[in-house]
Amino acid sequence: MALDSKIPKGPLADKWTNHKNEINLVNPANKRLIDVIVVGTGLAGGSAAATLAELGYNVKAFCFQDSPRRAHSIAAQGGINAAKNYQGDGDSTYRLFYDTVKGGDYRSREANVHRLAEVSTNIIDQCVAQGVPFARDYGGLLDNRSFGGVLVSRTFYAKGQTGQQLLLGAYSAMNRQIGRGKIKMFTRHEMLDVVIVDGKARGIIARNLVTGEIERHSAHAVVLGTGGYGNAFYLSTYAMGSNVTAAWKAHKRGAYFANPCYTQIHPTCIPVSGDHQSKLTLMSESLRNDGRIWVPKHKKDVEAIREGSLKPTDLAEEDRDYYLERRYPAFGNLVPRDVASRAAKERCDEGYGVNKTGEAVYLDFASAFMRYGKEQAHVKGLDENDESLVKKLGQEIVKNKYGNLFQMYEKIVDQNPYETPMMIYPAVHYTMGGIWVDYNLMTTVPGLYCIGEANFSDHGANRLGASALMQGLADGYFVLPYTIGDYLADDIRTGPISTDSKEFDEAEKSATDIIDKLVNNEGTHSVDYFHKKLGKIMWNKCGMARNEKDLKEAITEIAELRAEFWKDVKIPGKADEYNEELAKAGRVADFLELGELFAKDALVREESAGGHFREEYQTPEGEAMRRKEFQFVSAWEYKGEPKDAVLHKEDLVYENIEVKERSYK
């Protein structure tokens, strides 16, 4: 199958405007005749459901949480980008476009990213109108801060809880439509399959997680806004329930999957403390505006700190290695995420990690306390040489900017970050791969759309900070509502889609067969036993640094682990009841299939790009020789039975893209 991205012709800056002027529309009276299913109610799904319902479509919205408010978008902390240039520091639509493409290591689809930059300013206006409490400066204007990978301040924020506030805005818009009856909300429902009728997506099979009932739901189009698959690594910053199931089932029904191995490693997470952990916690990248990252210069100091005989605050400045400031003076601590992550790993691998496991570096705010404090003392006419007073004043400023993050850190680590430096280490945070979509956000299955993090299009091999919230809301509020009409214009006389058909019968049987197999399996190990094993393989052999030997081993090990899972997993309880272990088992079964595809994608990529660091080819000659100019796309031929995710090199489909020379290392 040839991939057609349907990117409009013409200059980059004119593509979106011209496209909107030329695509088909559905008039308001006909929108009442059309049903749309939206799976996922985070920023992408929630904004899409609210906007489509506002336009007049009949929307069915599904989430596995007990409320759309609990979507994982709520966990986003630092901010959302928009090219409003409020700081007057030279920002523009083009500069946001350029930074985002560069932050994606030139693997993003440029037409999509330019559109994202264009609509970014509308997002802020929309959210302010909804009442989102963005931070404001002394004069009452919206405030901005800087994020990694950029040289301007364009990130709008609400303390360290930006995702939560944006999600509440989308949730309020959804609630208005639920009250009007235009959105029918299905909480505690998990999509188990997408139903294809005559080559088009016409509905889904869902499981009521409370009763265990299998349900059929039909529509004229299906939209997936189900987030990323980072929980394949087990330990990640994702919510425990985040999964790949909806996207993976769509893949098995014919939707191509692109760039599965492109996973973002975030540099500022609370380090792993032991095997007892079930997830990791993110410390917002915004902290890198004021926190300085360092490790001791001398290994004797490292050993003393690990033993507890030396406090980091006792170490003199000349004995500290502020390695990002040393290596990347232009960006300093605000280098792109992949650069900061690799640098932290390199220091720790060399033996300079500061916690007991040797996998942590310091994020220190002492300099920020004194800088802000001196400014405040000067403004208030107080003694600028009184260090105690200056520090206290500075801490109040930092508390106002990041207070909830400092509180969260202290609760988890039991250390006061106002008195001792935070410890951080890289962790899996976001996925750039996902379902392949064209310019209209439609997958290779007609009528099946994919938005937000669940698709592959905007973030390339790495992600510019504060752009995930931007993409989710851009897709949901300002892109999909236009483009979906181009497809649905042909459905205004189709009439309701019946769920009484052989396609729905087959899809429901496929879902129930898998559930029955899991529930009736007489195994000996829990779901988490297998999930943890998968996570260790993924992190150790498909993580920040990869090589051919480890990747080949990972492929074999994951295949063996998947076979063991189906033979030896134990699911307590029954299918026709609330059974969280059963729901978890289905998700881990899909992670085991995805994991093998992930490793195969990484193996084929004999290059380094963004968070994908290929160890064998780190000479300039090797890198130049091995660079590939493609996006990886896989197809799954579905036979109605669980099938190994076997993908051979000759089966790959490549979408050619222009790859520019990288301008930073």
Image: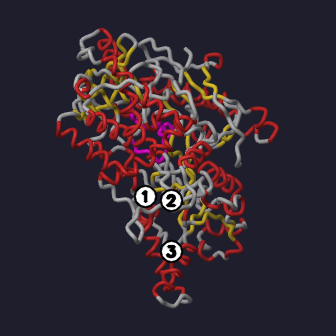
Q: Residue 286 carries which label?
A: 2
Give the residue at x 54% y 56%: 147
Which residues, given as a range, are shown in magenta? 224-240
In the image, residue 58 above or below residue 301: above
Q: Disc 3 marks which amino acid?
A: Glu
N-term-proximal mark, 2 vs 3? 2
Instruction: Indicate which disc residue 419 carries.
Output: 3
Q: Position of residue 662 (x, y in %)?
A: 70, 43
Q: Where is residue 458 in the image (x, y as percent from the top left)?
A: 52, 37
Question: Depth-wise, is mark 2 or mark 3 nearer the camera?
Answer: 2
| Above or below: residue 199 compared with residue 477 | above
Contact, CB < 8 Å: mark 1 with mark 2?
Answer: yes
The figure's colour scheme reads secondary structure
Q: Badge 2: few (under 14), some or many (20 or more) residues near its Cα, within 10 Å?
A: many
Q: Residues within 10 Å of mark 1 (few under 14, many from 20)?
A: many
Who's the residue at 43% across and 55% down the image? 77
Residue 376 vs residue 554, the one in the foreground: 376
Residue 157 is labelled as 1
**Residue plotted at (26% across, 26% down):** 31
Pointer 3: residues within 10 angstroms few (<14), some, or many (20+)? few
- Which residue lies at the image location 61% right of the left edge and 20% below the top edge? 652
